[in-house]
């Protein structure tokens, strides 16, 4: 319990002091595959990265939802699998019911990290590319 409290207080202190503050242009520079590689960084660091960026995405209303599972639910199920040393995760959807999706733990960690970062990157990309999808701009569909 003391370790969890210390982690929470440290992350709050870092966020308020500006260590982790990043603007939208910084998100586009992140190499997703490098940041979210479980082999390179280890599963616990990948989940911490996923939590950090998912919290930012949730504040901006950009959290990914894929196959009936929110990204925060996927992160929680991976954390639980790490504690119990399970090989597979079965994330819960927003209503608390178990989904039909079963994923290998390392893949689920990689996927949750990737979803958290890509949500922010896609929001940044959309600011400059959204007009390309408007009919009449010279693009043929």
Image: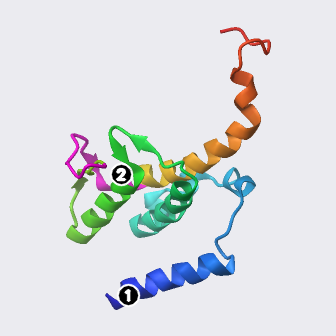
**Vertical order, 11 against 102 (above or below):** below
> In this view, which residue lies farthest toward the bottom?
2
At a point 48% along the width and 56% down the height, the residue shown is 37
Q: Which residues are magenta?
A: 94-109
At a point 71% along the width and 8% down the height, the residue shown is 140
Does 134 appear in magenta?
Answer: no
> In this view, which residue lies farthest toward the right?
138
Q: Dot 2: what SS?
A: helix
At a point 35% along the width and 53% down the height, the residue shown is 74
Q: CA distance from mark 2 to mark 1?
A: 24 Å
Q: Nearer the viewer, residue 64 or 3?
A: 64
Q: Locate residue 93, reporting x and y percent.
A: 29, 48
The crowd level at tag 1 (other Cα within 10 Å; few <14, some 14-19, many 20+) is: few
Tell me which label, 2 or 1, sits earlier in the chain.
Answer: 1
Q: Along the horizontal axis of the image, is 136 left or right of 121?
A: right
Q: Locate residue 82, reporting x and y percent.
A: 28, 67
Circle 2 sits on which residue? 108
Looking at the image, is mark 2 or mark 1 nearer the viewer? 1
Q: Quadrant of residue 136?
A: top right
Circle 1 sits on which residue? 3
Q: Is residue 63 visible?
A: yes
Quadrant where the N terminus sits is bottom left
Q: Along the horizontal axis of the image, is 134 left or right of 53?
A: right
The crowd level at tag 2 (other Cα within 10 Å; few <14, some 14-19, many 20+) is: many
Q: Nearer the viewer, residue 115 or 59?
A: 59
Q: Locate residue 73, reporting x and y percent.
A: 34, 55
Q: Along the horizontal axis of the image, is 15 left or right of 83?
A: right
Q: Dot 1: what SS?
A: helix
Q: Nearer the viewer, residue 116 or 12?
A: 12
Q: Is residue 106 visible?
A: no
**Vertical order, 30 against 9 (above or below):** above
Q: Along the horizontal axis of the image, is 44 left or right of 9?
A: left
């Amino acid at each position: 319990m003391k370790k969890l409290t210390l982690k929470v207080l440290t992350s709050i202190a870092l966020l308020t002091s500006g260590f982790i503050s990043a603007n939208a242009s910084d998100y586009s520079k992140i190499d997703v595959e490098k940041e979210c590689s479980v082999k390179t960084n280890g599963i616990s660091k990948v989940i911490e990265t996923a939590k950090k960026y998912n919290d930012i995405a949730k504040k901006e209303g950009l959290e990914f939802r894929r196959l009936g599972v929110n990204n925060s639910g996927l992160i929680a199920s991976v954390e639980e699998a790490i504690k119990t040393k399970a090989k597979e995760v079965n994330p819960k959807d927003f209503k608390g019911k178990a989904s039909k999706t079963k994923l290998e733990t390392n893949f689920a960690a990689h996927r949750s990290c990737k979803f958290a970062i890509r949500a922010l990157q896609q929001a940044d990309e959309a600011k400059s590319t959204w007009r390309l999808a408007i009919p009449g701009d010279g693009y043929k569909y």
